[in-house]
C-alpha cells in the first residue's frame, strides 16, 4: 500500500508537526535535510508534502493528500469539504476585532467598514452580532487600513498584541481561539480508517506527554 500522504503548512507549523512525529518515533531525517524538495519520505509510513496553508486544504479536499496540518484560521476561512480530526495544541493565537485606541467602535448606528485578510470570518462574526458592516479584503499589513482611514476596525490574528499597540490599535473583542488542526480527506478516512485512527491516537498521546 502506498504511504499516507500528509500536507504540512510550511514554517512554524511544519517544524512543530515534525517534532510531534519524532516524539511518536517516526524518522523525519529527510524533512530536516529537504533542500528544495517538497515531497519527502518519513520512513515507509508517510510522505510529507510542504505547502502554503490554503493549498494544504486544497490538496486534502481533492484527495491528493490524505491528511493535512493547518491553522484553524485557514479552516474557518475556507469551510471546505474535509474532516477536522484533532486539535494539535500548537500554533496558538486568536482571531480578534481591533480598532484605534480610545474610540467607541460599538456606539451609534452607522455602517462600519472592516478590513481583514479573513472576510468570511469577519462577516460571520458581525452577522452573529446583527451589525451592518462593509468588509474590505486586505492582503498585506491589515493594521494600515484604520491608520489610513480606509476602515473603522480590523479583524485579524493576534498573538501578543505588540503590532497593534505599536500602531495605535487595541483589541476590542476576542472572536475565537486558533491552533493547528489535523484535517483529513473524506474518502481517505473511509479507505484508510485504521491507519489514520492509529496516527490520531499516537498524536493525542504525544501531545498529552508534552503538557
Image (cartoon, rainbow, N blue to C red):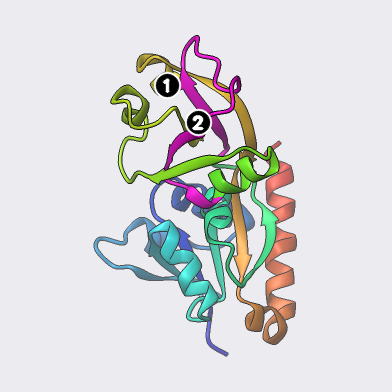
Q: Which mark is residue 164?
A: 1
Q: Is residue 83 above or below residue 171?
A: below
Q: Is residue 46 visible?
A: no
Category of crowding for the residue at label 2, using alpha-carbon neighbours closer than 10 angstroms: few (below 14), some (14–19), many (at least 20): many
Q: Furthest-left residue in view?
A: 36
Farthest residue toward the top?
A: 102
Residue 54 position in % (x across, y down): 44, 61
| Left or right, 68 with reference to 113 | right
Spatial distance from mark 2 to mark 1, Cα to Cα? Answer: 8 Å
Q: Is residue 86 above or below residue 42?
A: above
Q: Residue at x 61, y 72 (%)?
A: 81
> SS class of the residue under badge 1?
helix
Task: Residue 74: give x, y in percent of width and height.
Answer: 51, 54
Q: Quadrant of the C terminus?
A: top right
- Which residue is nearer to you in this view: 22 or 153? 153
- Please tell me how crowded label 1 is: few (under 14), some (14-19), or many (20+) other residues with Cα within 10 Å: some
Looking at this rendering, what residue extends furthest in the bottom direction? 1
- Position of the N terminus, as image quadrant, is bottom right
Residue drawn at x 36%, y 35% is 142
Going from the N terminus, do you reach mark 2 or mark 1 first?
2
Q: Nearer the viewer, residue 76 or 18?
A: 76
The quarter holding residue 140 reads top left
Determine if the magenta segment contains residue 108.
yes
Q: Which residue is mark 2?
A: 158
Determine contact: label 2, label 1, CB under 8 Å.
yes
Extent of the magenta region = 92-120
Amino acid at each position: 500500500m502506498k504511504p499516507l500522504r500528509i500536507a504540512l503548512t510550511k514554517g512554524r507549523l511544519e517544524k512543530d508537526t515534525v517534532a510531534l512525529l519524532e516524539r511518536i518515533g517516526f524518522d523525519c531525517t529527510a524533512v530536516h535535510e529537504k533542500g528544495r524538495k517538497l515531497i519527502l519520505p518519513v520512513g515507509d509510513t508517510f510522505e510529507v508534502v510542504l505547502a502554503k496553508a490554503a493549498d494544504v486544504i486544497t490538496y486534502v479536499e481533492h484527495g491528493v493528500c490524505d491528511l493535512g496540518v493547518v491553522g484553524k484560521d485557514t479552516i474557518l476561512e475556507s469551510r471546505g469539504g474535509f474532516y477536522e480530526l484533532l486539535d494539535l495544541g500548537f500554533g496558538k493565537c486568536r482571531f480578534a476585532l481591533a480598532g484605534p485606541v480610545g474610540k467607541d467602535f460599538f456606539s451609534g448606528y452607522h455602517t462600519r467598514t472592516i478590513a481583514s485578510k479573513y472576510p468570511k470570518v469577519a462577516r460571520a462574526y458581525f452577522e452573529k452580532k446583527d451589525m451592518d458592516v462593509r468588509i474590505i479584503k486586505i492582503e498585506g499589513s491589515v493594521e494600515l487600513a484604520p491608520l489610513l482611514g480606509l476602515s473603522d476596525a480590523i479583524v485579524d490574528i493576534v498573538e501578543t498584541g505588540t503590532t497593534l499597540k505599536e500602531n495605535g490599535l487595541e483589541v476590542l473583542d476576542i472572536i475565537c481561539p486558533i491552533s493547528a488542526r489535523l484535517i483529513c480527506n473524506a474518502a481517505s478516512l473511509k479507505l484508510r480508517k485504521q491507519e489514520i485512527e492509529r496516527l490520531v491516537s499516537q498524536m493525542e498521546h504525544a501531545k498529552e506527554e508534552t503538557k
